[in-house]
Amino acid sequence: NLGHLEGVDLTVTLDYPTARAVFVDANPGAGLQAWMAGKIQVDGDMGKLLPALQTTAADAATIALATRIKEITS
């Protein structure tokens, strides 16, 4: 655990179930639903977040990381 970084451009705050659904279970619909319900808070430069949200497919490293996190947290 590295803790909080200083001088960040953007902070995204969300609850554990939403984070798990989006990042581990790869369910982007859960993220959109949580955003619409006000369960995701974004502070800072939205311009840094939008390009990341427009990614159409996860690369092999991202898939491997999600798989490993799912194994650890299951």
Image (cartoon, helix red, strand yellow):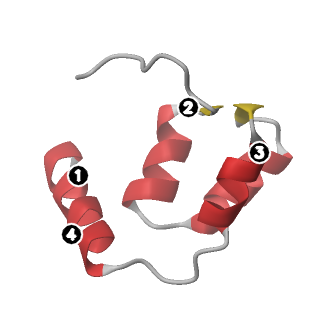
* Residue to which mark 4 is pinned: 64
Please report the residue visible at 37 percent of the width from the left and 57 percent of the height from the top. Answer: 24
Label 4, residues with CA under 10 Å away: few <14, some 14-19, many ≥20: few
Q: CA distance from mark 2 to mark 3?
A: 19 Å
Q: Is residue 11 left or right of residue 2?
A: right
* Residue 20 rendering spot, x and y as whole percentages: 43, 48
Q: Dot 2 corresponds to which residue?
A: 15
Marks 1/4 in contact by CB < 8 Å: the verdict is no
- Label 3: state its secondary structure: helix
Q: CA distance from mark 4 to mark 3?
A: 27 Å
> Mark 2 or 3 closer to N-term?
2
- Residue 10: % across, % down: 64, 34
Where residue 58 appears, as percent x and y from the top left, is 42, 77
**Residue picked out by circle 1:** 69
Foreground pick, 64 / 49: 49
In the displayed structure, does residue 60 sit left or right of residue 46? Answer: left
| Marks 2 and 4 close (CB-CB < 8 Å) | no
Of circles 2 and 4, which is in front? Answer: 4
Which quadrant would residue 32 be assigned to in this image?
Answer: bottom right
What distance separates the C-alpha of mark 1 from that of mark 4? Answer: 9 Å
Give the image quarter of residue 3. Answer: top left
Q: Is residue 5 above or below residue 16?
A: above
The label on residue 14 is none
Q: Can residue 18 be seen from the camera position used here?
A: yes
Q: Amino acid at mark 3?
A: Met
- Frontmost residue, 33 versus 68: 68
Q: Earlier in the sequence, mark 4 or mark 3?
A: 3
Amino acid type, residue under disc 2 in the picture? Asp
Relative side of 17 to 39, left or right: left
Tag nearer the camera, 1 or 4: 4
